[in-house]
Image: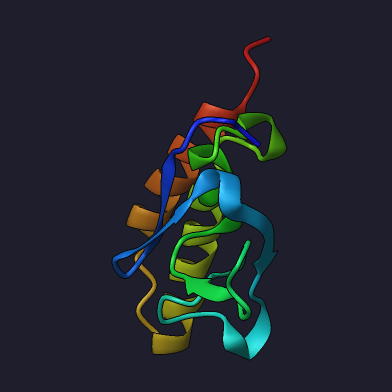
Amino acid sequence: MTSETRMVALGFGKFARADRIFALERITGDERGEGRRTRVWIDGVADPLIASRTEGTILRDMGQDAAVGPDLDEALDLAQRLAAAADAGRVDLSDLGRRARRLLESTTVPG
């Protein structure tokens, strides 16, 4: 963690000091969705806060860039959009294909 007093946005107007966050847990399964992405444990707060941002985004805001891949959030967003569109029977393959190509281009090591 960093020694500076940096505020990290958790979403829904919630913020926490970066040096007070001591644990993050990805919310999975039926609990995830509708703005529920990550449990955030903060020193001095008994129960975890529910963040609408992913643990990768929070870690990057805390200065922990090496802890996550640079485009994890975008990949998860793409997967969530695809699943929701498939469930609704309205898959826009053109849009999803464009997003997937852009994501792959940003993560591919030039060779």
Q: In x, y percent, where is residue 79?
A: 54, 63
Indicate left or right for 67 with 17 as reference. right
Residue drawn at the location 58% of the way across and 72% of the way down: 45
Q: In x, y percent, where is residue 59?
A: 59, 45
Closer to us: 30 or 83: 30
Q: How is the image coloured?
A: rainbow
Determine which quarter of the picture holds residue 35: bottom left
| Residue 45, placed above or below residue 106 | below
Taking the image as drawn, is residue 56 in sight? no
Q: In x, y percent, where is residue 72?
A: 58, 47
Determine which quarter of the picture holds residue 6: top left
| Residue 18, placed above or below residue 90 | above
Q: Residue furthest top?
A: 111
Residue drawn at the location 47% of the way across and 86% of the way down: 87
Closer to us: 39 or 48: 48
Closer to us: 49 or 75: 49
Indicate left or right for 96 with 41 as reference. left
Q: Give the position of the C terminus as an image quadrant.
A: top right
Closer to us: 84 or 45: 45
Taking the image as drawn, is residue 75 in sight? yes
Q: In x, y percent, where is residue 13?
A: 29, 66
Residue drawn at the location 67% of the way across and 77% of the way down: 28
| Residue 27, placed above or below residue 20 | below
Residue drawn at the location 52% of the way across and 50% of the way down: 58
Q: Give the position of the N terminus as an image quadrant.
A: top right
